[in-house]
Amino acid sequence: MCGIVGYIGKANAKEIIVEGLRRLEYRGYDSAGIALYRNGKIETRKHVGELKNLEKIIADPEYDSYMGIGHTRWATHGVPSDINAHPHSNSDNTITVVHNGIIENFLELRRMLEEEHNVVFRSDTDTEVIAHLISLYYDGDLHEAVNKAVAKMRGAYAIAVICASEPDKIIGVRKDAPLVAGIGEGCNFLASDIPAFLRYVRRVIFLENNETVVVTREKITIYDENNEQVEREPYHVDWDVDAAEKGGYPFFMMKEIHEQPKALADTLKRRLDENGDIVLDGISLAREDIDRLSRIYIVACGTAYHAGLVGKYVIEKMTRIPVEVDVASEFRYRDPYVDENTLFIAISQSGETQDTLAALREAKGKGARILSVVNVVGSSVARESDDVFYTWAGPEIAVASTKAYVTQLMCMYMIGLYMGRLKGTLAEADYHDTIRELLAVPDKLAAFLEDDTQIKNLAKRFYRRNEMFYIGRGLDSTVAYEGSLKMKEISYINTFAIAAGELKHGTIALVEEGTLFITLATQDKLFEKMLSNIEEIRARGAYVVAVAKEGNREIETKADEVIYIPSCPDDLTPLLSVVPLQLFAYHVADARKNNIDKPRNLAKSVTVE
Ligand code: F6R
């Protein structure tokens, strides 16, 4: 995720800002930049790639100041490049901005600035729009111009702005993206995240949504959305830098589990217009393209493959086009039937997985149209695809994938909804009902995440086990596979997942007194069948932990313990039911004292075959 750092004081701003950016590196980024006020001007330097690339081009001692802003970028609009890196400025470089988040109406604003004000844009970013917009309203009062610009901007963002004519201040705005000010002695800070300035100050002021902050050397003044001044007590930070990077969580995996509601909301809401219509930015799938399709392949590896399994259910159901899912390492070598009427959907968090890339090339070579669902902008899979549907999960640092998976699921629903509606195989009412239910998921998930005591206690009881079984039917079976993989990779326990109906064809021979079964029973239409499966294994001595929908109390008569997830339609349960399984794996691994973020033998991105 992008990082913002601002400093105003008496010390060497360049060094302080670069140190702050270094402290934000853990969040992941693809380019970095800095803008300093010098000799009546704002001088910006930026570079794609690692921070050390930026450091090389700002090394000269003359490039220095007492104030400036810096940024690490995680691309959302426009590929990672020097030009698209932040900061961005207005045409005469007198107003400069860094920005986290997304401006949803940036195209509309860009068009207005180009057509009505002859603005010439230098980058592909939504951020540049902000600089030109503030410039349009600037009439000697930066604060007022920022307020006017913000009133025109839709989206979730945090920004920091400086102006060559008012070099005594940095202005920040927070709207649904974090921004925090740090209070120093004769200096002050602004950042997207506390670690950026924790080395220098411990007293901080958290901004609330829709607040603006004016940071000068002497004071920090907060304004609410009505431009009324707000008083706020500073907060004293007593965590160390390491804990701060993880947002106070002991491991990135737990932080990322808790980021899921936001990641889901970002992936969905930013692509819905005010009528609830899905706007697939950058994807040109027209009705005639969809009508031509005779089959869809979804190809991926590991967790991304499990997201593809959900994709098969929902896309096939909504579009009535046959969908096949394959692991990439199999697809690429089995001479699959692919032609120009094939849509090939690659799913990859990193966009660099060698097998997925090779499968994509195989399908492309045979004439398929390639749509990828990718988290990392500008990655190889994204670059080699005809269309890219980005998951907006932000950087995922823990090796075990969590937030990328749920956002991949969200993309599967959105692709199904979009194509099904256009093709006419999905009724309007069903489309709108599903969108409404999807919109409700982030809050339901946030409520579920408030208390994980039950799951933690379960982990304390079972962490010494050598094996665990995961079962489910329909969509629940796909979540069983993912829950089992999560447990395996971070706890090193031998787990096995199987569609519950398949148990009796062999695997049930393994059940004995006390065998632990994690049983998903969230599908109303398959509920009775699942109860029979639970009876089958309990009769042979299994201990059954069930995951079921809230309100479905009948399960308590069959299972030994039940974890309830918030209620939602059957088709959407994977978005919620995977979370207790992620938490269970996490707490088991924690009880076993494993290095949760970096499990043995695994790498975050598998770039070899
Ligand atoms: C498991 C996990 C892996 C990845 C797989 C594909 O938690 O993260 O199974 O899902 O290696 O990686 P991407 O999505 O980067 O292609």
Image: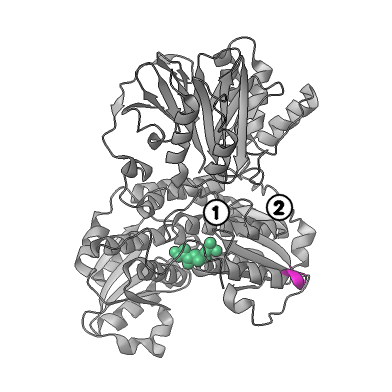
Question: Can you identify the residue that label 1 sits on?
Answer: 434
* Left or right, residue 158 beside residue 578: right
Asked whether the viewer can see residue 261, the reply is yes
Q: Using the rendered view, name the quadrant where residue 165 is placed.
A: top right
Amino acid at the residue labelled 2: Ile
Q: Nearer the viewer, residue 435 or 161?
A: 161
User: Which residues are the magenta region?
Assistant: 364-368
The residue sitting at 38% across, 16% down in the picture is: 186
- Label 1 CB-ligand 1 distance < 8 A: no
Distance from disc 1 to disc 2, alpha carbons, whole Å, reads 21 Å
Earlier sequence position, callout 1 versus callout 2 = 2
Asked whether the viewer can see residue 32, the reply is no
Q: Nearer the viewer, residue 550 or 33?
A: 33
* Left or right, residue 1 beside residue 351: left
Is 337 rendered above or below residue 307?
below
Q: Position of residue 1 (x, y in %)?
A: 50, 44
Q: Nearer the viewer, residue 160 or 309?
A: 160
Q: Are marks 1 and 2 in contact (CB under 8 Å)?
A: no
The stretch drawn in magenta includes residue 441: no
Kindly state the secondary structure of the residue where label 2 is placed.
Answer: loop
Q: Nearer the viewer, residue 481 or 351?
A: 351
Q: Position of residue 463 (x, y in %)?
A: 24, 68
Amino acid at the residue labelled 1: Thr
Q: Residue furthest front?
A: 61
Q: Magenta part mainly helix, strand or loop? A: loop
Q: Using the rendered view, name the quadrant where residue 559 is placed.
A: bottom left
Question: Can you identify the residue that label 2 sits on?
Answer: 283
Q: Residues within 10 Å of mark 2 (few under 14, many from 20)?
A: few
Q: Residues within 10 Å of mark 1 (few under 14, many from 20)?
A: some
Q: Position of residue 333 (x, y in %)?
A: 64, 81
Is 317 rendered above or below residue 205?
below
- Pick the quarter of the image with the C terminus: bottom right
